[in-house]
Amino acid sequence: MKITLIIFLLCFLVKVYAQPIVNDTVSDFTVIDVHGKTHNLFTYLDSNKFVCVDFFGITCQQCIELVPVFNNAYNNFGCNKGDLIFLAINSMNSDGEVLAFEQQQGGIYPAVSGIDGGGQTVYQDWQIQYYPQLILIKPDK
């Protein structure tokens, strides 16, 4: 409950408004971040972890402004070693472009490219129309 409230406040403070997912449950995905690590949504959820997904674009000003806020939350909640997993997913760029964005903006949480990492498929499956968009997923999916 505390995690949910903090993520809600985080979204409110940075003026990011996410469109709710229409389905009662989310669909699974497996993606590979720009550093080669594989992430499977249901594996995290089945381990009783919450997952916060940041759908982002590399040229989006609001996405750029969100990086230090997301970094802070990522650090404060254990750098994906606790009960909350952070994952950023891009839709239209390559690993190289997302890695350059990560380095330029100082992103420290896992970021997935749309082209090489599988992010484009997640955008399509989840019908993500715009970014930035933050979605918090409870362990019950």
Image (cartoon, rainbow, N blue to C red):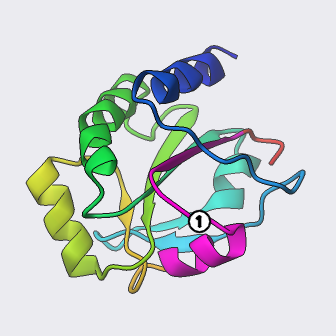
Q: Which residue is the extreme one toward the right?
A: 24
Residue 56 drawn at (x, y percent):
40, 58
Residue 141 drawn at (x, y percent):
80, 48
Magenta-drawn segment: 119-137
Residue 28 drawn at (x, y percent):
73, 67
Residue 92 drawn at (x, y percent):
39, 79
Q: Is residue 131 above or below residue 40?
A: above
Name the residue: 27% across, 42% down: 67
Residue wearing tag 1: 129
> In this orientation, which residue lies closer to the viewer: 111 or 59?
59
Magenta stretch containing residue 129, yes or no? yes
Report the side of 21 relative to 52 (left or right).
right
- At label 1, the amino acid type is Gln
Q: Is residue 58 above or below residue 141?
A: below
Name the residue: 32% across, 45% down: 62
The quadrant of the rendering that contains the N terminus is top right
Name the residue: 37% across, 74% down: 113
Name the residue: 83% across, 42% down: 140
> In this orientation, which residue lies closer to the viewer: 51 or 121?
121
Report the side of 30 relative to 21 (left or right).
left
Magenta stretch containing residue 122, yes or no? yes
